[in-house]
Amino acid sequence: MHNTHHDDLKSSKDFLEFMMAGAVSKTVASCIAYPHEVARTRLREEGNKYNTFFQTLHTVWKEEGRAGLYRGLATQLVRQIPNTAIMMATYEGVVYVLTRRFNNKSNEFYDF
């Protein structure tokens, strides 16, 4: 019979996997949502070239192409991916420590 107490032990590999999951999810989300950030930034500029959200997206696409909608994405990814990876691993680590400390039976930590 397996000792379930040792089956739930986490290793550094598990936390690296959590970090990778956070990094991949942040990359995908940023690539999908980045044109929205570009439009928001352009709408805050002085002048009357950009008036509405969709008009701004259309103008940027027409004048600058796809590259205009993703200008600055690499910089944001370099800044955000490590932050998200560390945050994900830290969250999972805290949940793991608290669960092991306060819950010796089952995984009732998540039950409300």
Image: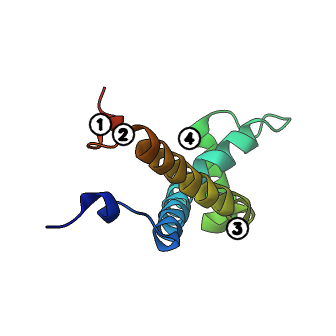
The disc, 2 or 1, on the residue closer to the chain's N-terminal end is 2
Q: Which structural element holds mark 1? A: helix
Q: Nearer the viewer, mark 3 or mark 2?
A: 2
Residue at mark 4 to residue at mark 1: CA–CA distance:
46 Å
Tell me where residue 66 appears, x and y as whole percent. 60, 66
**Label drawn at residue 103:** 2
Measure the alpha-carbon separation of dots 3 and 4.
Answer: 23 Å
Image coords of residue 110 (percent x, y): 34, 36
Q: Give yes or no for contact between labels 2 and 1 (Cβ–Cβ under 8 Å).
A: yes
Q: Amino acid at mark 2?
A: Asn
Q: What x and y, as percent, mark residue 67?
A: 66, 67
Q: Amino acid at mark 4?
A: Phe
Residue named by callout 1: 108
Q: Secondary structure at mark 4?
A: helix
- The residue shown at (61%, 52%) is 87
Q: Dots 1 and 3: beta carbons under 8 Å?
A: no
The disc labelled 1 sits on which kind of residue?
Answer: Glu
Element marked by disc 3: helix
Quarter of the image for the C terminus: give it.
Answer: top left
| Residue under numbered circle 3 | 74
Which of discs 2 and 4 lies nearer the camera? The answer is: 2
Instruction: Tell me, for residue 54, which label it has, or none.
Output: 4
Q: Are marks 2 and 4 in contact (CB under 8 Å)?
A: no
